[in-house]
Amino acid sequence: SRNIRLAVIPGDGIGTEVVAEGLKVLEAVGTKIEPTHYDLGAARYHRTGETLPDAVLDELRGYDAILLGAIGDPSVPPGILERDLLLRLRFAFDHYVNLRPVKLFPGVATPLAGTPTENIDMVVVREGTEGLYAGTGGVMRRGTPHEIATQESLNTAHGVERVVRYAFEKAKARPRRKLTLVHKTNVLTFAGDLWQRTVNRVAEEYPEVSTDYCHIDAASMFFVTQPERFDVVVTDNLFGDIITDLGAAIAGGIGLAASGNINPEGAAPSMFEPVHGSAPDIAGQGKADPTATILSVSMLLDHLGLHDEAARVERAVAADIAERGAGRSTQQIGDDITARVSG
Ligand code: IPM
Ligand code: MN
């Protein structure tokens, strides 16, 4: 098989630790990969003032995929690394699908005591390039008692339709064939109307998929009380951000939550990353769970068409989770999953 040209951005905090384990698994699965490391993140920012130089962005464009650890550090004012590095990558490479599976593996303790494993098995299709993340808006009279800050949600017909179509395709390929739009159409009347009309229109092309609608507030409740309601969820950037942390919580915690920032047409490399952040409080101690990164590696393989390899990684993770005890280090978990993948 061909060589995968992989750009690796370990980033900040526990990012470096979990990415090392993800790469171990990737090598063990028998794919020929050529990883190239990029030292983007807080350290580079402090050293050079750079977040993501244009030349690096151009270079990254040439890879088959990107594996990212985590971005963000308390020593850098909030927003700089997030906006100029992480969001810049998502926007520049048009990662309009932010794919976030919410799946409870057998053996995982969920706070939803007594919930059967099969009841939590959904995938959230979060829009990744628009909405409140677009950065439009502004501030007037800053620092005065009369300060006015606006932050607008940008929703385009093109942007909404392409992510909705992707979600319908996903739903069609899953056994339950159900798509739920999550929004707040009762208050966000302009954007909500565009999303709802788009779903209604595209739904006509997918008679085999049943569609449903849920307000974001109610959806937050149903994620906890009736997670079996959801199969594929499609939603905007911010609602998707929030609800996938809740999704991670019900499916065993942030240590297991994987994601893919996907450019479905392959016009630019897709980027795979754990949903969790850089966790500076536990960085460098070998305490982070690399499972979320390893599951993101499985998504990466799947995206590149290496479906058997992807499934092998997921099975290895499932087997590891089913038998896991407490107290293993980041490296031990990585080694144990690697052994299952190779063996
Ligand atoms: C995520 C993160 C990011 C987001 C932050 C770090 C900008 O929370 O990937 O979910 O809000 O998208
Ligand atoms: Mn988030």
Image (cartoon, rainbow, N blue to C red):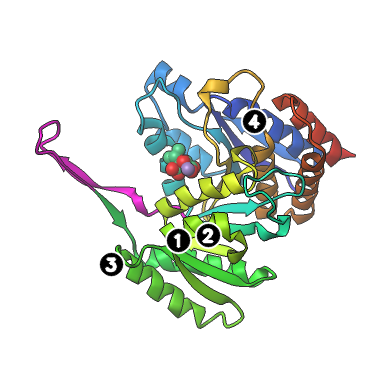
Q: Nearer the viewer, mark 1 or mark 3?
A: 1
Name the element at disc 1.
helix
**Membership of 21 in magenta stretch:** no
Reading the chain from its start, which is encountered first: label 1 or label 4?
A: 4
Question: Residue tagged by mark 3?
Answer: 190
Towards the viewer: 267 or 167: 167
Question: Residue tagged by mark 1?
Answer: 218
Residue contact between numbered discs 1 and 4, judged by CB atoms under 8 Å: no
Reading the chain from its start, which is encountered first: label 1 or label 3?
A: 3
Question: Residue tagged by mark 4?
Answer: 18
Q: Nearer the viewer, mark 4 or mark 3?
A: 3
Q: Is residue 334 visible?
A: yes
* Pointer 1 local density, CA inside 10 Å: few below 14, some 14–19, many at least 20: few
Residue type (three-letter) at the residue carrying disc 1: Ala
**Membership of 144 in magenta stretch:** yes
Disc marking residue 222: 2
Residue contact between numbered discs 1 and 3, judged by CB atoms under 8 Å: no
Reading the chain from its start, which is encountered first: label 4 or label 3?
A: 4
Between the residue at mark 3 and the residue at mark 2, the CA separation in whole angstroms equals 25 Å
Q: Which residues are magenta?
A: 126-150
* Label 2 CB-ligand 2 distance < 8 A: no
Q: Nearer the viewer, mark 1 or mark 4?
A: 1
Towards the viewer: 241 or 57: 241
Horizontal and vertical percent position of residue 93: 47, 49
Q: Quadrant of the C terminus?
A: top right
Does 205 appear above or below 276? below
Between the residue at mark 1 and the residue at mark 3, the CA separation in whole angstroms equals 20 Å
Residue type (three-letter) at the residue carrying disc 4: Val
Residue contact between numbered discs 1 and 2, judged by CB atoms under 8 Å: yes
Q: Is residue 93 visible?
A: no
Reading the chain from its start, which is encountered first: label 3 or label 2?
A: 3
Between the residue at mark 1 and the residue at mark 2, the CA separation in whole angstroms equals 6 Å
